[in-house]
Image (spheres, grey):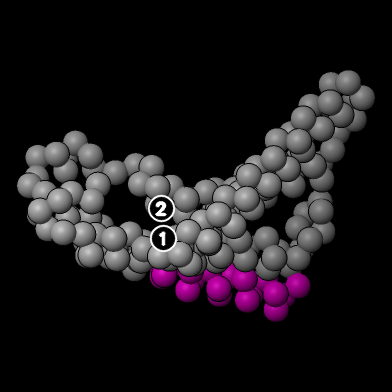
Amino acid sequence: MKVFDWLGRITSVIGVTIFSGMFLMMLYIVFARYILGITTDWAEELVRYLVIWTGCWVAWLCIRDESHPSFELFLTWLSSGMQRWFQIVISLIGILFCAWFCYLSTFLVRRCYLHSSRSETLDWPMWIIYSFFTLGMVLLTIGYVERLIKFITAKPSTSAI
């Protein structure tokens, strides 16, 4: 699973970079508004996109590290074998949902590209902005596939949770 580890490290660096940019931009907005007395609509729009992009990147890391919300209380009532099967079913549902969302988001990206839609203040092509949803769903699908492989290859007597 070295490919997943390599992808995880790259995703972590990109996620931290996006989050850091968002944080610095928020500091700039506060400084500009309260110290300089000017509004920066472009910066507020950029922060909005950076928040969404951070969520798309970090969600995959949460799936990888098992730090996403889950049914822990429910799982404790099940035997280790049943926990394993429950996690396999959850992984399959996650794969189907994320792959379907990825498929649908490509239509949105395509439509924005064909219509030359642009963002309100930054005047960026919207297809680039929406591409992060598609990329995030690709990463989540990969994360659920990795999770599925982990639970399928786990020994039935041990818990992989």
Residue 144: quadrant of the picture: bottom left
Q: Residue at x 68, y 47 (%)?
A: 17
Q: Classify mark 1: helix, strand or loop.
A: helix
Query: Residue 156's spot in the image, x, y percent?
Result: 12, 58
Q: Quadrant of residue 33?
A: top right
Residue 103 lies within the magenta run: yes
Horizontal side of 9 relative to 125 (left or right) equals left
Q: Residue at x 29, y 60 (%)?
A: 150
- Residues rendered magenta in the picture: 97-116
Vertical arrangement, residue 77 with respect to residue 99, above or below: above
Q: Which tag, 1 or 2, sits closer to the chain's start?
A: 2
Numbered label attached to residue 143: 1
The disc label shown at residue 64, or none: 2
Q: Secondary structure at mark 2?
A: helix
**Tag 1–tag 2 contact (CB < 8 Å):** yes
Give the CA distance from mark 1 to mark 2.
6 Å
Residue 35's image quarter?
Answer: top right
Q: Nearer the viewer, residue 107 or 153?
A: 153
Q: Quadrant of the N terminus?
A: bottom left
* Left or right of 55, for residue 98: left
**Is residue 68 placed above or below 123 in the rendered structure?**
above
Residue at the spot 90% in from the left edge and 30% down from the top edge = 38
Residue 43 drawn at (x, y percent): 79, 42
Relative horizontal placement of residue 150, taking residue 9 as reference (left or right): left
